[in-house]
C-alpha cells in the first residue's frame, strides 16, 4: 500500500518561482505574487515548467519534495528502493521491532501453483517459527533476524524531490522493472501527478518521451506503456 503523506505546498508555483528568479530583476515577493495570481498565475507557472522540462534544465525541480509511506512491502523490494540515493529513508527496524507474526509476500508465480504455494508457505512459516524460538531462548533480535527471508513485510517512509522522482519513474516504472517495485512506482506516480501535472506529465519509462532504452530486452509494447503514463496512470 502506497500513501502520499506530505508534499511541498504549491509545488508548481515553488518551482516556477525559483526558475524565474534566475532570469528576473524583480524580487522574490513580486515573482511569487505573479504566479499566485489565481488560475492565470498557475497557468504561467505550468508553461514555464513545460519549457524547463523540454530544455532539460531540471535543477529547479529539486525545490519540490514528496513524502511517501509504503506498507506491506517486501524486504526484497525495499532493498531496490533504497538504492536511489537522492532521497531520505526511515524503515522499520528488525533490530528493535520483533517479527512476532509471520508476515510475508507471495509472488503470483508461486501463488498460482498449489504445490509451489504449499511448499513456499511451509518453509517460510518454519523460518518464522525458528526465529520465534530463538527470540524466546534469548537470542537478540538483531541476530535472530539473519534467518528472515527477503519476502518479509516491511514498512518505509521516504522523501524524494521532483527531479529524483522523474528518475525513479523512468527506471522503476518500466515493464522490465521487477514487478513489486514497478507497482510501487506506478502508485506513487498516480498520487503525485494530480498534485503537479506540469512536473510529471511525460514522466515514466524512456519510451514515454522517446525510444525504448532496453534494446533487445524491450517489452515490445512501448505504445501501450506510453498511453498509460500520458493518461496519468489511469490505465495501470
Image (cartoon, rainbow, N blue to C red):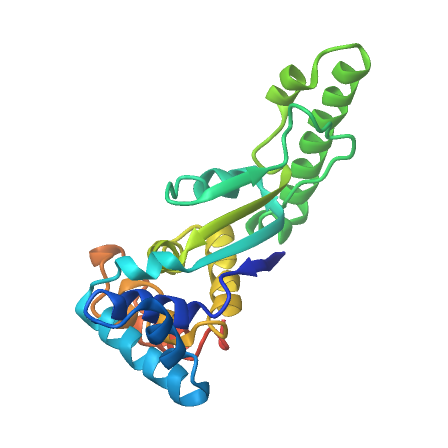
- Give how far across and how far down residue 82 sits, in percent: 45, 40
Please say if 108 is above or below 40: above
Residue 136 in view here: yes
Q: Residue at x 47, y 65 (%)?
A: 189
Which of the two residues, 15 or 143, is positioned nearer the viewer here? Answer: 15
Q: Residue at x 33, y 67 (%)?
A: 28
- Give how far across and how far down residue 180 sits, in percent: 51, 51
Q: Where the N terminus falls, by quadrant? A: bottom right
Spot the residue most to the right: 136
Which picture quadrant has residue 203? bottom left
Please say if 77 is above or below 24: above
Which of the two residues, 81 or 118, is positioned nearer the viewer here? Answer: 81
- Give how far across and how far down residue 223 sits, in percent: 31, 76
Spot the residue most to the top: 138
Which of the two residues, 169 or 107, is positioned nearer the viewer here? Answer: 169
Residue 203 in view here: no
Which picture quadrant has residue 37? bottom left
Question: On the picture, is 230 further left or further right than 180?
Answer: left
Please say if 103 is above or below 212: above
Please say if 76 is above or below 30: above
Which of the two residues, 229 or 65, is positioned nearer the viewer here? Answer: 65
Amino acid at each position: 500500500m502506497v500513501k502520499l503523506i506530505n508534499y511541498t505546498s504549491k509545488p508548481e508555483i515553488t518551482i516556477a518561482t525559483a526558475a524565474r528568479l534566475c532570469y528576473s530583476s524583480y524580487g522574490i515577493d513580486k515573482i511569487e505574487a505573479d504566479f499566485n495570481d489565481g488560475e492565470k498565475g498557475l497557468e504561467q507557472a505550468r508553461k514555464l515548467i513545460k519549457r524547463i522540462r523540454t530544455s532539460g534544465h531540471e535543477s529547479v525541480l529539486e525545490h519540490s519534495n514528496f513524502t511517501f509511506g509504503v506498507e506491506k512491502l517486501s524486504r526484497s523490494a525495499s532493498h531496490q528502493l533504497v538504492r536511489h540515493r537522492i532521497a531520505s529513508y526511515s524503515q522499520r527496524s528488525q533490530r528493535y521491532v520483533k517479527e512476532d507474526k509471520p508476515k510475508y509476500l507471495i509472488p503470483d508465480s508461486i501463488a498460482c501453483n498449489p504445490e509451489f504455494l504449499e511448499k513456499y508457505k511451509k518453509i517460510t512459516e518454519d523460518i518464522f517459527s525458528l526465529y520465534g524460538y530463538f527470540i524466546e531462548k534469548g537470542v537478540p533480535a538483531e541476530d535472530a533476524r539473519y534467518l528472515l527471508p527477503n519476502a518479509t513485510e516491511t514498512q518505509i517512509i521516504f522523501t524524494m524531490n521532483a527531479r529524483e522522482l522523474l528518475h525513479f519513474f523512468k527506471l522503476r516504472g518500466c515493464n522490465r522493472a521487477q514487478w513489486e517495485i514497478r507497482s510501487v512506482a506506478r502508485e506513487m506516480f498516480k498520487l503525485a501527478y494530480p498534485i503537479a501535472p506540469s512536473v510529471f506529465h511525460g514522466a515514466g519509462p524512456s519510451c514515454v518521451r522517446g525510444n525504448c532504452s532496453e534494446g533487445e530486452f524491450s517489452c515490445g509494447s512501448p505504445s501501450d506503456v506510453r498511453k498509460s503514463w500520458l493518461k496519468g496512470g489511469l490505465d495501470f
